[in-house]
Structure formats: C-alpha cells, structure tokens
Amino acid sequence: MSRYRGPRLRVVRRLGNLPGLTRKSPRRDYPPGQHGQARKKRSEYATRLEEKQKLRFNYGITERQLLRYVRKARRTGGSTGQALLQMLEMRLDNTVFRMGMAPTIPAARQLVNHGHVTVNGRVVSIPSYQCRPGEEVAVRDRDRSRNLVENNLQFPGLANVPSHLEFDKSKLTGKVNSVIEREWIALEINELLVVEYYSRKG
C-alpha cells in the first residue's frame, strides 16, 4: 500500500483532526461520500481500523512501515502502544515538524528528503531516521535551506514546541532532550486499539 497523495481534507472529515497531515479544517463536520451523514452502528473492527488509519495518515507512513513499528514496539517491553507512539514521534520528519520548521509532516518530509536538515552537523535525508536524546537537529547552513525554514517558522503547524525538544529560532538549531512524554503527543488517538488491531491480525 503506497503513501497517500489524495485530498487531505477528505481524510480529516473521515478520521477527525490530524495535526500532522494538514493545517486546514474542513467546512463540513461529517464524513465524505453519499452516506456520510447517515448514522450507522460501527463494529469493533471498524473502530480499531479507524484508529490505525489515524496513525498511518497523520505520520504519512505505509501499512508495511506501521507493521514494522508495531513489531519493534512489542519487543521493547512495557506498553506497546506508548512505545509505538514514541517511535513515530521521534522520527526525523516529525521532529522537524514539531520544532516548527515545517507546517505539516509531509512538508517536513520534503525538507529532509531534499537535504535541508542536519543531525549533529551531518546532512540526513532519511525521514524515518530515529532521533535520540542529545542529538542536535538544525537547518543546513546555506541560504536556500535557511530561507525555506524562516518562511515556515512564520506559520507553524502547532503552537507549542513539546517539552522534550528545544529550538532556537535565531540560530535555526534545535535539540532533542529526551523521549517524548505521552501527554505531549498532539494526535488524539487510543493506541491500545491499534495494538489490538494488529494482535488480532496475528
């Protein structure tokens, strides 16, 4: 299943607010399609599937990538759901977004892909790179990169930089201080339902 490139507001209408996917909010508050306004009883499977889809669309990952993260989270010990969310939040593209360098996660992924971001002074162009506490994430020291990020900083996607990160707007450098706490995750989600979805699939 490839990465979603269709209309983003359609997904937001179906799944609810996804802060990483788009800054726009839909004009209609019911799901899209001919039967969007019909009240229908949702099965347990549909509820679990919806929570899983929220993760996929918000963080812009494929089904295969998400399954890999779930398997990795199971091996960590402790809460699988929390470990899964922390792994997704500590991705480089999401870290760039949460620092305010890009308005959405897809925009942050593009910044990383195009070599505008450095980690500990070295250019890293892999959006799925896992940021670790103590690492410095900065804008590459060239005019094009700095101009792009300075423009983005005027319209940040989220108002606050989470407590595990710090970002200096004048120097365009940030630091990862720790792993993100659960309460700082902006996406409204029940991660236990995602874990249940995959445990029932085997």
Image (cartoon, helix red, strand yellow):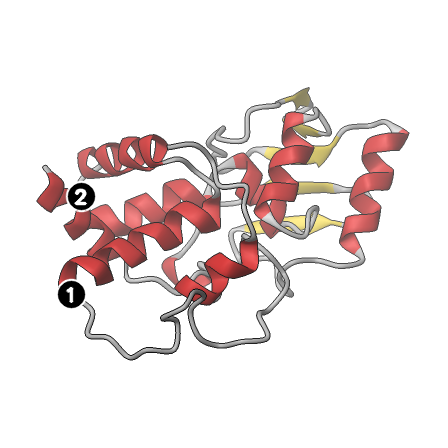
Which element carries disc 1, helix, strand or loop?
loop
Which residue type carries mark 2?
Tyr
Q: Which mark is residue 43?
A: 1
Residue 84, by quadrant, is: top left
Front-lying residue, 193 or 135: 193
- Whichever of callouts 1 and 2 sits on the residue coming sooner in the sequence is 1
Q: Residue at x 24, y 52 (%)?
A: 194
Q: Residue at x 73, y 29 (%)?
A: 116
Which element carries disc 2, helix, strand or loop?
helix
> Can you say which quadrant of the picture contains the N terminus?
top left
- Number of numbered discs: 2
Q: Residue at x 47, y 36 (%)?
A: 3
Q: Which mark is residue 143?
A: none
Q: Residue at x 53, y 45 (%)?
A: 177
Which residue type carries mark 1?
Ser
Residue 140 on image: x %, y %:
77, 28
Q: Neighbour class for label 2 at 10 Å: few (<14), some, many (≥20)?
A: some
Front-lying residue, 42 or 130: 42
Residue 118 showing in the rendered view: yes
Residue 119 on image: x %, y %:
62, 28
Q: Is residue 39 above or below residue 90?
A: below
Which residue, given by chain and number where applicable, does mark 2 sit on?
198
